Image (tube, rainbow, N blue to C red):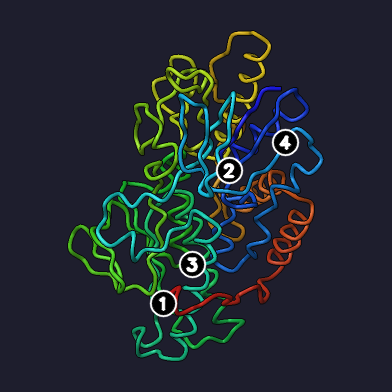
Amino acid sequence: MERVVVIGAGFAGLSTARHLAGHPVQVTLVDHHNFHTFQPLLYQVATAGLEPADVAYPVRTIFGREPTITFRHGRALSVDLAARTVALADGAALEYDRLVVATGATTGFFAVPGAPRHALPLYTLADARRLRNHVLACLEAADARPEDFDGGAPTFVVVGGGATGVEMAGALVELLDVSVRRDRLRIDPDRTRVVLLEAGDRLLAGFEEDSSRYAAQTLRDRGVDVRLRTPVAEVTAEGARLADGTWLRAAAVVWAGGVTVDGTLAASLPTPRGRGGRVTLEPDLSLAGHPEVFVVGDAGAVPRGPGAPEACPQVAQVAMQSGKHAARQILRRQAGEPTTAFAYHDKGLMATIGRHAAVAQLRRGPVLRGTLGWLAWLGLHLVYLIGFRNRLVVLVNWWWRYLDWPSGPRLIVADVEADR
């Protein structure tokens, strides 16, 4: 039986393993976390809308009834393409006949001085938990020592006007509102600010321009200070300096400015890399010169289709489709059949701006905005969220918040001093 090693239990890795299940291959799925994270909802963990366990699910439970799939908890350090082995941090080596690299990406700070040290990224579950602790601790500190926060008026800066930045900014405004109304924190709601900085000329660059304008206007109507064409030049412990020299004092600088493959295992593969460090691939998603190796998801410059010059966006639907395609090519090669080129099927884009407000740009039909867009966004995320318990908890949570915004899990549950 062929041995297939899949590195990474994100959307791409899980998709590969699922589509190999039940076939005559022995799959070893490797990840340094023993759970899968539903990344689209991390911003809700970061703003105390959901608990970490609501957006994570144990990998062993996902494949508990699949005898041909084994999970290996460990960090993959390197790949020896000649020996066809994967070296793990604990000294073990996994042999493979086929390899799927689905190691994703990591936060890209793009050489902005001070950003890696002082900005708070939002890419992993640990990031979301750390960010929540920091934000809630800042609010408590502003209540206890208002003189340290401009008289009880802290400012929160979000860098990056993509979907993550837009969603984070909208959720922060709602968190500030409920902290005053429900928790009676003594902060000045009229002067407390959320500032969203985008270096480009519009938010949600991958969406239609009308959707970008809607997102910007909705955020502004809700009190977010949206600043376009405003790159960040430096981040410090006290705030951010803009490219024009303007200084923004901030209780927290949230980094949603993009991702990079640099620093991940995929970056060590001996192959050309494209924008953001993404691995250049053959049309069937294999590695040039190594047809037994596939790179899927955010780690690869996944082509949109045969002859298409541009790569797919780094979003969940690309990860799932590319993982499925890699699994099919492995089975085709096992059957002695030629591989086929990947073709991306764009199902649309979605981004939520806050309660009752979202943009759902579907492949067919009208663009949904406002409450309809928000309901479409909720429905899609519930479909893809793994685990019945998680779906039920998130559904009840969202429905309760739809009726009103009750006291939620606004708990500081870590070593706050270390997080700050």
Measure the C-alpha gap from mark 4 to mark 1. 51 Å
Where is mark 1, residue-wise?
192
Mark 3: amino acid: Leu
* First along the sequence among labels 3 and 2: 3
Classify mark 2: residues with Cα within 10 Å, few (<14), some (14-19) or many (20+): many
* First along the sequence among labels 1 and 2: 1
**Mark in the foreground, 3 or 4:** 4
Secondary structure found at label 2: strand
Compared with residue 78, is residue 130 higher up or lower down, i.e. above or below? below
**Residue extending furthest toward the front:** 91
Measure the C-alpha gap from mark 3 to mark 2. 27 Å
Question: Residue 131 bears which disc, if any?
Answer: 3
**Can residue 171 be seen from the camera position used here?**
yes
* First along the sequence among labels 1 and 3: 3
CB atoms at circles 4 and 1 under 8 Å apart?
no
Measure the C-alpha gap from mark 1 to mark 3. 18 Å
Where is mark 2, residue-wise?
360
Mark 2: amino acid: Ala
Compared with residue 278, is residue 126 higher up or lower down, i.e. above or below? below
Horizontally, residue 144 falls left or right of residue 18, namely left
* First along the sequence among labels 3 and 4: 4
Where is mark 4, residue-wise?
69
Secondary structure found at label 4: strand
Horizontally, residue 294 falls left or right of residue 382, namely left
**Can residue 363 be seen from the camera position used here?**
no
**Mark in the foreground, 3 or 2:** 3
